[in-house]
Image (cartoon, helix red, strand yellow):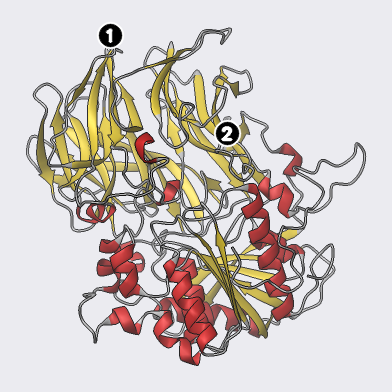
Amino acid sequence: MVSRPCPGLPGRPTTYGGPMAHPEPGAPAGPLTPADLAALRSLSDPQVSPDGRLRACVVQEPAPEHGEPERSAIWLARGDEPAAPVTSGAGADQTPRISPSGRFLAFTSDREQPGLWRLYIAPLDADGTNEPWKIDGVPGVVEDIVWAADESGLVVLTADEGSDSGNIRGATRFVPPEEAGASFLVRRPATVRRRVHWVRLPSGTVRQVSQDDRTVWEIGWAGQGPLAAVVSADPTESGWYDAELATIDLADATTKIVYTPSWQLQSPAVSPDGRSIAFLEAPQSDRALLAGSLTILDLDTGSVTRPEHEADLTRVRWTADGRLFWLGVASVETACGFFRPGETGWQLDQRWRGLGTLGRTYLTAATCSLDGTTIVAGFQAHNEPPELRQLDQRPGEAPHWRALTSLNTALAGRARVRESVHKWKSFDGIEIEGILLLPENGYETPLPLVVVPHGGPTNATTSVFAAGAHRGDGILLAQAGCAVLLPNPRGSTGRGREFMAANLGDMGGGDLRDLEAGVDSLAAAGIADPARTGIVGISYGGFMSAWAAACSDRFAASIPISGISDWLSFHHTSNLGRFDEIYLDGSPYDPAGPYLDRSPVFHAAKCRTPTLLLHGDADLACPVTQAQEFYQALAAVGCETEFVIYKGAGHGMTEREHVLDVSERILGWFSRHLGFPVPGGTP
């Protein structure tokens, strides 16, 4: 739905030669197009068998057509053989978990009903001909699986049907079958939770082991002994922000709180002897995206140890010999390695660090085998599309990531863009950094500039293949002749807790000034034209784009995507209401507080920045009313504005038609207001 037509843009997006445009043999490959980026296959959740022989991941198929469900499959690499799919069929297969013996694969699939993931087990026979069998009787939507060390059963984390899916799944709902065609819905507080079940094999009998008065957000288990869990009494998404660390006794189904944090928790991991739990703690705006400090809790004494490390860690797991594998964000880079126990404490062993991303944008993903010999990741970088890779290192040589898949080879090296790390001093002398994209060659400075603040705000921009706010729009803009700055302002991860917490109580304050200082630095270097500067971002980046439009005169055009314009209504309509209380450091019931002062909609009267709003109508994290409010406020004061609503889309657009339309509109809006031609025609 478009509130009024975007001049020059058709109702349906212009195509750029069809999906995955492969060049003719011998012909030079052309630059990346929106259709190429829509056809990109992504991967997630890398897994390794205990001996490192089997490596698995989830391969997400390209953006589906309108009305079609998303599809994904489990791919597996055996020994030196290239990876190949081991699941197939309709629907999305995900959450691969290889059994300790390597004989079985547990996974989840929504092949029976889109959006409702059930539990399946497949034998990993060499010929791959045996069909998986479904484990009936597991209530709810399966979100995580852990094998028992002796393969006598599985610990399964489930969400009750009707639960919110969380931001990383688009912030929609797991719709129960009986609601799918209902003409009305009933909502009551605290009626759905996330629970833990024990599934005995081979019988398939199911027993709940978590307590009904606790919601379980995340689990960790060594395959025997106590289960570690991140739990809260509040079952809503807001409850995660006040969650605690607990142990769950699988025998008597009791839960015991063992640690109450100052901030948020992630990645609980139980040591092989069952006596310690390692976990991560930090301020975090988004569930599952935490990057912070390592804490090791001794379950016998209750004492905690906090090893020193430079990177903000995103995942930890134990090896059989008592080391801790870690993954993290360091500055604009990602890194991985081990902590080794020693006589003087934990020793840091960094195996790799570089300008590339282990995982997806904001969601790092890498793991190691139980014996610690094999490290795999979904690796991507500038001009290197996502592939499952294994970290190899020969004596005397630098480590490198060897590809196990060839999912996106037709796209490699096709971005006609140069990437570099850009650093500048902000208004108070703090150094800020980010990724700078420039046209590959043949351009004259100063260039039009587009600033792309990241989501979160507690996240970081790192080097990825499809850089930008939404499906590679940064690459498309740079190819069209723009400079593109993807900054990591205060509040970002990768530089420690003090920097990470620097925008608590100041969203839209110092971080906006960091962005403005970045514009000044590029203008001073003769790279960018400050009079032709735009801003686009998604989620918190959408808030920053709306805030900049309303409260800064530095931007000639703005595109908030799935953003926030009114913190007061956000608190009462979003499923993340606790987030704004923490990050605004105020009360929604204080009329003199930050809820009104830091809301773009209440500053719309002074806005003169042409603003294009893009939003999905099924978004639960940032409801579509956020865009509706800002659009109507801007229209009422005569500011140029347009509003596009994507039907059925959650927190971000995933359908092919939507993805292409977003790309077209971003290029078109900035082309008109920053003054540069769009490849293939002027919109």
Q: Does residue 343 appear in the picture of this structure?
A: no
Q: Is residue 66 left or right of residue 651?
A: right
Percent position of residue 113, x then y? 45, 31
Q: Is residue 617 above or below residue 219?
A: below
- Residue at 46% across / 82% down in the picture? 513
Secondary structure under tag 1 reads loop
User: Of the residues under marks 1 and 2, which one precedes in the sequence?
Assistant: 1
Q: Does residue 58 appear in the picture of this structure?
A: yes
- Residue at 77% across / 71% down in the picture? 8
- Residue at 66% across / 76% down in the picture? 449
Q: Is residue 588 left or right of residue 72?
A: left
Residue type at numbered disc 1: Ser
Question: What is the residue that sits farthest to the front in this orientation?
Answer: 183
Q: Badges 1 and 2: C-beta atoms under 8 Å apart?
A: no
Q: Which residue is mark 1?
A: 203
Q: Which residue is mark 2?
A: 389
Q: Is residue 308 left or right of residue 350?
A: left
Q: Is residue 633 left or right of residue 274?
A: right
Work out whether residue 45 or residue 14 is closer to the camera in this orientation and state it.
14
Residue type at numbered disc 2: Arg
Percent position of residue 111, x then y? 49, 27
